[in-house]
Amino acid sequence: MLEVAAIHSGYGNIAVLRDLTFTLGRGEILGVLGRNGMGKSTLIRTVAGVLPARSGSIKLNGEDITALPTHLRAARGIATVVQGRGIFPKLTVRENLEMGRIASSRAKRDRSEEVLAYFPRLRERLSQLAGTMSGGEQQMLVIGRGIMTDPSVILLDEPSDGIMPTLITQIGATLVEISRQSGMSILIAEQNVPLVFSITNRCIILEKGRIVAEGTREMVSRSEVMKEYLAI
């Protein structure tokens, strides 16, 4: 579904991603692990089209989208949940969800009931201003807003950041359910190893913008890179 081949990307004269290659299958959840500054957010931004790839290619369902701007990638089915959530704090939960559908040229159906089934807590807060909710509830909201765009791929950047452990577990379990029930593919960039290992079967580890370990959860967990990662 998503094919990233030999991608190089960065900011100005600073190279961050170096020769990254991986695939993401339909209905698969792929974890991207790494410490701060190793290129996880840069990867999400490059796949989303916020940052241009300096070389290499990105394909979605066989179509080369490397040169497409962000809004056209979204129209092809890529939804991005940025670190820090990016809700509309003065709009209600219902209005935030509706913004996802309205903003998408792709969404041909109202998926609000599906979203509320995944996140029952949002149903209880439909009339509440989004800015007054907890961090975990806001994260549920932005994931739900992403689903409202009717995507085939969701990109998640540090979804556990600033969230209570109990809600992290709940959000992780819901991501697995979303992937299984809808067939959506999920790329999740995280520092939270337990979360990533609990929801993925395959992971990659970034170190200074390069993939230094990849494979199944079991393979990655036994790698020397992971031992060093967990020791810090």
Image (spheres, rainbow, N blue to C red):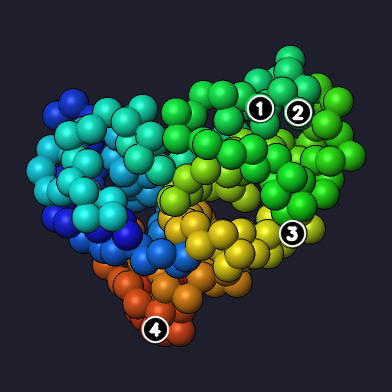
Query: Residue 170 — which label?
Result: 3
Q: Measured from the top left, where is residue 6 in percent x and y? A: 14, 55
Q: Measured from the top left, where is residue 26 in percent x and y? A: 41, 64
Mark 1 or mark 4, whichever is nearer to me: 1
Q: Residues within 10 Å of mark 4 (few under 14, many from 20)?
A: some
Question: Viewed as shown, does residue 186 lie left or right of 225?
Answer: right
Quote the CA–CA distance across marks 1 and 4. 41 Å
* Mark 3: secondary structure: helix
Q: Are marks 1 and 2 in contact (CB under 8 Å)?
A: yes
Q: Residues within 10 Å of mark 2 (few under 14, many from 20)?
A: some
Mark 2 or mark 3, whichever is nearer to me: 2
Q: Measured from the top left, where is residue 8 in percent x and y? A: 16, 45
Quote the CA–CA distance across marks 2 and 3. 21 Å
In the rendered view, tell whether residue 138 sits above or below residue 211.
above
Residue that mark 2 sits on: 94
Mark sitting earlier along the chain (1/4) = 1
Q: Are marks 1 and 4 in contact (CB under 8 Å)?
A: no
In the rendered view, tell whether residue 88 sits above or below residue 165.
above
Is residue 98 in sight in this rendering? yes
